Image: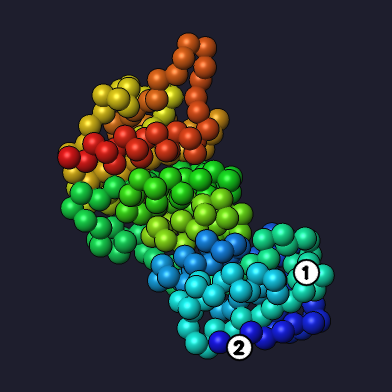
Amino acid sequence: MDPLRIDDPRDPRVAAYLDIRERDLAGRQGRFVAEGKVVLDLLLTAGRFTAESVLVLENRLDGLEDVLRNAPDDLPVYVATGDVMDAIAGFHMHRGILAIGLKGAPLLAESLLNALPDRGLVVVLVGIANHDNMGSIFRNAAAFGADAVLMDATCCDPLYRKAIRVSVGAALKVPFASFADTPRFKALLDQQGFDQVALSPRGLTDIRDARRTGRLALYLGTEGEGLPDSLLARMRTVRITMSEGFDSLNVAAASAIALHHFSTSRA
């Protein structure tokens, strides 16, 4: 493909990249920003989402040759100098690699569950509103082989630029869907044969003693408040035992421990 040079930050061809941080807050009408070489590679190869265009710092283009081989022949690849790229983005772009992806139609939670394997492992998020935590949970889900992430309506967008970056692109790879009503969703998981486990500092069982036999849904809640008591009362609860006088881990760190445990105890 022949790169297309951009010399004017207001060139309409790169309008989707303008003022990235402000657009992060305002929304992109079905688009998202992917940042960095590893994330771009996953956008082009994971198959979940479609790339609309790529914007690259001119001195980074040669290093993307292998990555861009996976791009469709008609994908626009724009190149710019550092000054022009910074003016487009609205801040200094030290990575120098951006892409616009298309979200497409969201996956339906029930359809996603129907497609999971007999011993599927899913992460269920309730109230995760911090993009760093969201990205880290997706990264952990990918690292330990979770088959999907399901989120309630109060969770933040895993396709927010920072969440994608923190996930190192895992948010573009691990299937995810949202649900509106947590009790109804729990009932759906019951129908699908999932053992449902809630991670909580007040959990009744130490996670080292917890076992799984088949399909498992691991519930994680927001830091501080945690999962609602009404939900904890209706499922098996596990805890990561702390040293005396210490309450809990960051939810992202806790998710890594729990996912490692339940992924390695599949047999």
For residue 54, above or below residue 191: below
**Element type at marker 1?**
helix
Residue beneath disc 1: 82
- Location of the C terminus by quadrant is top left
Q: Pick the residue in front: 239 or 42.
A: 42
Residue 46, percent across and down? Answer: 41, 67
Residue, x 46% and y 56% (percent of image)?
170
Residue pointed to by mark 2: 2
Name the amino acid type tagged 2.
Asp
Q: Position of residue 172 (x, y in %)?
A: 46, 62
> Observer-nearest residue: 253 or 73?
73
Q: In this view, does 95 lie to the left or right of 32?
A: right
Q: Nearer the viewer, residue 179 or 65?
A: 65
Vertical placement of residue 255 versus 148, above or below: above
Q: Circle 1: is it few (<14), some (14-19), or many (20+) Cα within 10 Å?
A: some
Colour scheme of this structure image? rainbow
- Classify the position of the N terminus by image quarter: bottom right
Q: Residue 113 in the image: x percent, y percent?
A: 28, 57
Q: Which residue is drawn at 61% across and 54% down?
A: 162
